[in-house]
Each structure stands twice: as structure tokens, then as C-alpha cells.
Image (cartoon, rainbow, N blue to C red):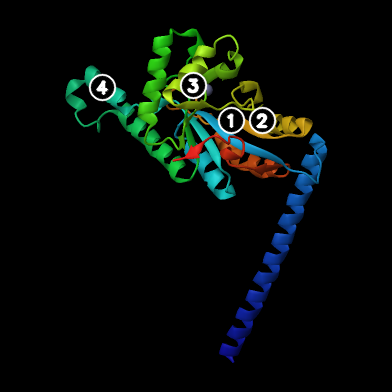
Amino acid sequence: MIRTMTRYTTGYTRWLTATMTTFALLFAATVQAADCEAIRAKYSCPAEQKFPLHLSFDDGPAPETVDVLAALRKERVPATFFVLAEKIDCERRLQECKQAEPASATDGSQCLEYRQCQLRRTILDQARRDGHMIGSHAYSHLRYSSLPKELMKRHFRASKRLLKPYLTTEPALFRLPYGDGWFNRQEKPHVLAALDEIGFVHVDWQLSAFDWDTKNQEGDKILDNVLSQVCSRKNGGIVLFHDGMDNQMHAGRTFTTENIARWIPAMRCVVDFKPLDYFLKNIKLK
Ligand SMILES: [Zn+2]
């Protein structure tokens, strides 16, 4: 009797669980559909068409990049990271520690800067192993079109040497800080010519999330920026986000890194996430 009751209870529990799961899925689907409907209405985006979009993140790696990687993994979205090579220049950190305190920095274990640098390398390696594209954002966050040519080239070469284990394509991807590549394409062609000579291909963006602007770092203004551009242009492209700071070695752009997991499903209402080679045909994966 007890066994029968148990069996009955187990069966009933299974049925109840299955029914609740079905309701939960239907409810989730309804909520998702309703959200998408509201999003399409808000930005006047057509229901019958989705626009191709590729996410790119500049100025990392930062500790908070792991939150971006987790969101991308969960949502199965490919992305490209344009990395500041000085953030993974761990030898430089070690040298700086040795100069400041020669006795304590023989293997780097006592050098906080070195250990933080190694962490950033681990995060970058994770991004590569997750299948994302990695490119150079130069050695430092400088306006290279205003620098002497030789210094500029030295920085480009240093970034290629340091990022060599992580770069994912041939030619290697590069994005100049401050949009220098396309603001100065006509007036200062020597910058892009140098990149070409060193074996880089410059990757522009077609849309910006404007997430660097602190005025946008509240509510869903950054999501608004992306969706209003996609829906008004009726076109996608490569969109620029940031996962790190240009002028701080450790801090991430926490507003973006904390919210990207929430913005991706909302973006998916109107876009199809595409890999970089959808937009950039002349690259070979390494
Ligand atoms: Zn930048």
C-alpha cells in the first residue's frame, strides 16, 4: 500500500512537475514574445526581418571581462575583443616591481601588478578558447595618427609580439583607439599603411553603443542606442562596446559588463548575432 502510494505520489509529482514546466515554458515564451513585440514597437522595427549584428569589445582585458564571457557563453553569441597589449605586458610589470623593490620580486609572486597582469592573460586565453576573435587595440590607448611614425610603428609591432599567442586570424585584427582609423583615413593614410605593412587588417565599427559616455550609464540607454541605430538604419553591422577602461590598468567598464547579459536577449528580438567573418570576408582563421 505504502509502495502503491509512493508510486502514485511519485507519478503525480512527475505529472505536476511536467505540467508546471510546460506552463513555465509557455509563460516564458509568452513573456519573451511580448517583450519582443514591445521592443519592435518601441524602435519601429519590422517583425518579419532580423538584422545581422556582431558584438565587439574594446579596451580590455579586465577582471570584469569574465562576466561578458559568461553572458556570451550562455547566449551562444560570438564576439571580438580588441585588446590593449600593455594590459598583458607582464614582463614590464615585473621589471617595475624589481626596480621599486629588488628583493621581493624575483618570481613575481610578491608583485601585485604582475599577478593582476597574469590574471588578465588567463581571461584573454579563456576568450580565445571560447571561440571569440582576438585583435589588437594597439599597445597603449593613444591617438597614433598624432605620434611620430617610428614610435607609432614600434607600438604596433610590440602589440603584435605580445598578443601573438592570442591573435586568431591572418592577417591579425586591429582597431585603432579613438576611431583614429576612419576619422583620419583620408588625411593620414600612413597609419593604415603601417598596419598593413606589419600584417594587420583594420576593423571599423558601423554602430556604437556609446557605453563609454557616463551619461549613458544608467537604465537601458546603451541598449536604446544600439537598437535605435539598428532599427532606424534597417541594418546591422559590427557594434562597439567596451569591457575595459582605456586609462586604468585594472578596472572594467562595469556598467556594460554587468548588463550585457540582460541586453543580449533584448537585442536578439531584432538582430541575428553573426560571427566576425560574416562582415569581414578577407580574414583566415588561424
Ligand atoms: Zn579604445
Give the residue at mark 2: 222
Q: Which one is earlier in the sequence, the residue at label 4 or at label 1?
A: 4
Give the residue at mark 1: 241
Q: Is residue 100 left or right of residue 7?
A: left
The Cα–Cα distance between marks 3 and 4, rounded to whole angstroms, is 22 Å
The Cα–Cα distance between marks 1 and 2, rounded to whole angstroms, is 9 Å
Which quadrant is home to the C terminus? top left
On the image, the x and y values in percent for residue 257 come to: 55, 35
**Up-down relation of residue 276 to residue 23 (above or below):** above
Q: Is residue 167 left or right of residue 105?
A: right
On the image, the x and y values in percent for residue 232 come to: 78, 30
The Cα–Cα distance between marks 4 and 1, rounded to whole angstroms, is 32 Å
Amino acid under label 3? Asp
The Cα–Cα distance between marks 1 and 3, rounded to whole angstroms, is 13 Å
What is the number of the mark on residue 95?
Answer: 4
Q: Which one is earlier in the sequence, the residue at label 3 or at label 4?
A: 4
Dot 2 surroundings within 10 Å: few (below 14), some, or many (20 or more)? many
Q: How many marks?
A: 4
Residue shown at 61% from the left, 86% from the top: 5
Q: Which one is earlier in the sequence, the residue at label 4 or at label 2?
A: 4
Give the residue at mark 3: 246
Q: Is mark 3 within 8 Å of ligand 1?
A: yes
Q: Quadrant of residue 78?
A: top right
Which quadrant is home to the N terminus? bottom right
Q: Which one is earlier in the sequence, the residue at label 1 or at label 3?
A: 1
Label 3 SS: loop
Residue shown at 62% from the left, 21% from the top: 213
Label 4 SS: helix
On the image, the x and y values in percent for residue 123 come to: 42, 38
Amino acid under label 1? Phe
Contact check, label 1 and label 2, Cβ < 8 Å: yes
